[in-house]
Every structure is written in C-alpha cells, then in structure tokens.
Amino acid sequence: MNEVIVAFSSQAVLGESPVWSTSTARLLWVDTLGASLNVFDPVTSHNVVHAMPSPLGFVTETPAGQWFIGAGCDVEMVSRSGERQLIATAPHGQEGYRFNDASLDPSGRLWVGLMNEGLKEGSGYLYRLDPEGAWHTIDSGFTLINGIDWSRDSKTLYVTDSLQGVIYAYDHDLLSGEVRNRRSLISISPDKGKPDGLTVDREGFLLSVLFDGAAIARISPEGQIDCMISLPVPRPTSCAFDDTGQYLFVTSARLGLSKSEIARAPASGALLRIDYQQVTG
C-alpha cells in the first residue's frame, strides 16, 4: 500500500469535509465532533488548527476565496484567523438537527445536507443556498445525507444517503440550479461499508469513501464499481484532490472504535494521501 501514506497524524474523532483551497494552496478539513477547522500545508506537512463550535459539518471555499463552515444549523463565514460571521440558518434548522456534507457548484451555489442527529429515518433535507442568500429546498426524505458532487459536464448531480447505502443521481441544470429525475445510481452492499464522502475524478468516475469498509469505491458514471482502493483505516470519511489531481487526500475517524481496533489501525483519525495516478495506473 505504498500509494497510500499518512499525510498528517491527527487523531480526529470525526475527520470530514476535505476541500482544496486554491487561494492558499492548502487543504481545508474539519473534525466534526472534535470541533476544529484545520488548514493543512502539503509542502511542509504543517497543520493549523482553529477551534470551532461543535458539531462542525463542513468547510468549503467560494470562488472569491471566502471560507464557509456549517456550524450546527448555521452557515458561517470564517476569516483566515478563525473569526466567524453568521451568513444564514437552515430553513428546517432546529434542536437535534445539524448540517452534514456540502459542496459548491461551478456557479458558486452552496448545496448542503441537513440531518437529524438521532438519524430518524427520512428526516434529512438537501438545500441550495444561492449567493444572494436565497434558500431552496431541493429534496427531502434522506436519513444520513452525505457526499455531494457533479459530473464533469455539471449535467448530473450526485447525492449520497449513507444509511440507505445509495448514491442518487439527478438531472442538473447549471444555469438555473434546478434538478429533476432523481434515480438510484448505485446501491452499496452493507458488507462493503457505508458510502460517505464523494468526489468525481477527471475521468468522470465517482470516488465514494466507504465508512466501515476501509476503502474507496471508484464507480463509473453508469453506476458500476470499477475498482476498490484499500485504506489502512476502517472508517475513512471523505476525500478531495489537490490542484494537480495527482494526490487524493482522505479524512478518517476514530469515532466508535475500541482501543483494540485503534491498536490494529493506528492511522485511524489521520489525514491520508493517495498517489491517485499510481493507484489508477
């Protein structure tokens, strides 16, 4: 497994939401339950930690270089020094709910999922927050909404429901931001793990990180598993490419693992780096 290394030996409770910051040439990621926003420099391997409120669902960077986080049910803007400013609150935000995964589309719209912390079946929402501040409820009925990304031509939106084990596809209109025709692209067998974070590679294949599966599934646009990328942690959570597309960074979790399980997989909670070109040949 020489293609996979530990980039930073963090011990995150629930590492999540890696995203490449083009404005700083750093990787942004969060520890959802450890309540931290992290800024990792892959050149120096130095990781800057900003204390944040918990739970911290996501971080993302706008085309203008602004950092947005999901803190509970609030979207906030964060300065480089860690100062926060409230931007918006989820339409269905209430006690017992929080934001989970999120992604920006090429037009700068924020697509974000809201989940019930008790994982009540069918209680989750998918929203779109437009740059001018308007909320749109795109869909509902999710249990644990996760992994959001688009096909290379932006004509298809992919959304994951981890507990259902399904990655959905929608027809997507980039100009209007509207979606239609939700269908199941692929169902992941529970014995392979739970589909979690998601990104799309340069060839249009989906990379679905498998929580409790110690792997990433590379999935064709037609919904067929092309290959599995093995990882040295049982609970990987999400992934993101650097600006070159050569390296794929993967967050992971220690959440729910026993001492003996961590002893067998000491990299759990670490930030991993994959030489993607080497892995995919």
Image (spheres, rainbow, N blue to C red):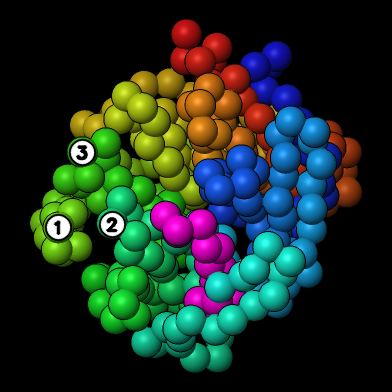
Give the labeled residue for mark 3.
153
The residue that mark 1 highlights is 175
Image quadrant assignment for residue 139: bottom left
Instruction: Give the secondary structure at mark 3.
Output: loop
Left or right position of 211 against 5 = left
Split into 4 quadrants, where in the image is the N terminus? top right
* Gap in angstroms between the C-alphas marked 1 and 3: 12 Å
Disc on res. 208: none
Cα gap from disc 2 to disc 3, whole angstroms: 13 Å
User: Is residue 118 something one can see in this rendering?
Assistant: no
Task: Residue under label 2, please give it.
Answer: 107
Q: Magenta segment, which residues?
A: 62-76
Please indicate whether residue 107 sits to the left or right of residue 183 in the image.
Answer: right
> Where is residue 121 drawn, in percent x and y?
40, 73
- The kind of secondary structure element at disc 2 is loop
Sequence-wise, the earlier of marks 1 and 3 is 3
Proximity of marks 2 and 1: CB atoms separated by less than 8 Å: yes
Q: Secondary structure at mark 1?
A: loop
Q: Nearer the viewer, residue 199 or 161?
A: 199
Q: Of label 2 and label 3, which has the lower sequence position?
A: 2
Q: Earlier in the sequence, mark 2 or mark 1?
A: 2
Q: In the image, is residue 268 above or below residue 144?
A: above
